[in-house]
């Protein structure tokens, strides 16, 4: 599992506990380069990031990404050749919703890291955000051949309408199974770990 921005392994403890209880699943957690235990990992560009992923994720793995981690995994799905992919509230929002520039995104992120004294390297985090910004595509744009589970939070309302419209528009993409988790925020895997674990278990147990 590739983390989201500002999330460490403690963020998924409840989810992993539920997955272990269901089927003895265990999560190999990867912090993004530039934060927490990977703070000193320097990433200069998209190619370097892909090489870093290849060193940590064997081919035919079941890969999972949360938020920014999901966006970045999606951009390298062909390189990683996963067996299945699980997306936790990510890989769906593009610039048609955000309507910001990369300069604005980077300035906000650097200021936020400084103001909150976060254990992050702002240069590497900026590189990762540039990779996401430059790709500017969601999982539906990829014509995925990898069986994929997309789990989405249902708040805030404006974002829900945007997500729902995309999901409904692409129901014909049968490799992607999409579900909304009711009454949840972006941190839904900490709010509804049992429900999300069951959705993951059902997906991994199914013939796809």
Image (tube, rainbow, N blue to C red):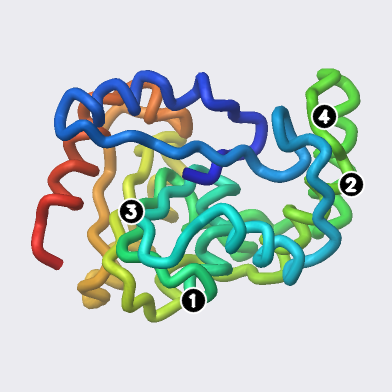
Picture disc at residue 150 = 3
Indicate the quadrant where residue 36 lies.
top right
* Camera-side residue of 102 and 201: 201
Q: Give coordinates of residue 74: x percent, y percent.
A: 51, 64
Dot 2 or dot 1, earlier in sequence: 1
* Alpha carbon distance from label 4 to label 2: 13 Å
Q: Nearer the viewer, mark 4 or mark 2?
A: 2
Q: Mark 2 = which residue?
A: 123
Q: Which of labels 1 and 3 is toward the front?
A: 1
Residue for point 40% across, 22% down: 190
SS category of the residue bearing label 4: helix
Assess whether mark 3 and mark 1 are in contact (beta carbons under 8 angstroms).
no
Q: CA distance from mark 3 to mark 2?
A: 30 Å
Residue 10 screen position, x and y as percent: 51, 19
Residue that carries the numbered disc 4 in the rendered image: 112
In this view, the residue in front, 97 or 37, is 37
The disc, 4 or 2, on the residue closer to the chain's N-terminal end is: 4
- Badge 3, how many Cα within 10 Å: few under 14, some, many 20+? many
Identified at 23% across, 60% down, the residue is 177
* Quadrant (top left/top right/bottom left/bottom right) for the C terminus: bottom left
Q: Which residue is mark 1?
A: 78
Look at discs 1 and 4 and give the one toward the viewer.
Answer: 1
Question: With respect to residue 78, does 13 lie above or below?
Answer: above
Q: Nearer the viewer, residue 11 or 50?
A: 50
């Amino acid at each position: 599992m590739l983390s989201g921005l500002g999330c460490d392994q403690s963020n998924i403890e409840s989810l992993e506990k539920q997955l272990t209880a269901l089927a003895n699943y265990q999560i190999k957690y990867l912090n993004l380069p530039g934060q927490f235990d990977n703070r000193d990992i320097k990433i200069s560009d998209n190619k370097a990031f892909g090489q870093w992923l290849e060193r940590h994720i064997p081919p035919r793995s079941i890969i999972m990404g949360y938020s920014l981690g999901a966006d970045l995994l999606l951009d390298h799905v062909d390189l990683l050749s996963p067996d299945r992919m699980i997306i936790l509230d990510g890989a769906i929002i593009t610039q048609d919703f955000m309507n910001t520039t990369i300069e604005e995104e980077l300035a906000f992120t650097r200021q936020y890291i400084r103001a909150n004294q976060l254990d992050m390297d702002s240069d590497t985090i900026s590189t990762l955000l540039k990779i996401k910004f430059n790709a500017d595509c969601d999982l539906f744009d990829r014509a995925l051949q990898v069986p994929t589970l997309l789990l989405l939070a249902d708040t805030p309302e404006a974002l829900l309408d945007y997500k729902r419209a995309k999901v409904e528009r692409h129901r014909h993409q049968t490799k992607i199974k999409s579900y909304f988790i009711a009454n949840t925020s972006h941190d839904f895997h900490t709010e509804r770990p049992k429900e999300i674990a069951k959705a993951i278990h059902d997906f991994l147990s199914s013939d796809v």
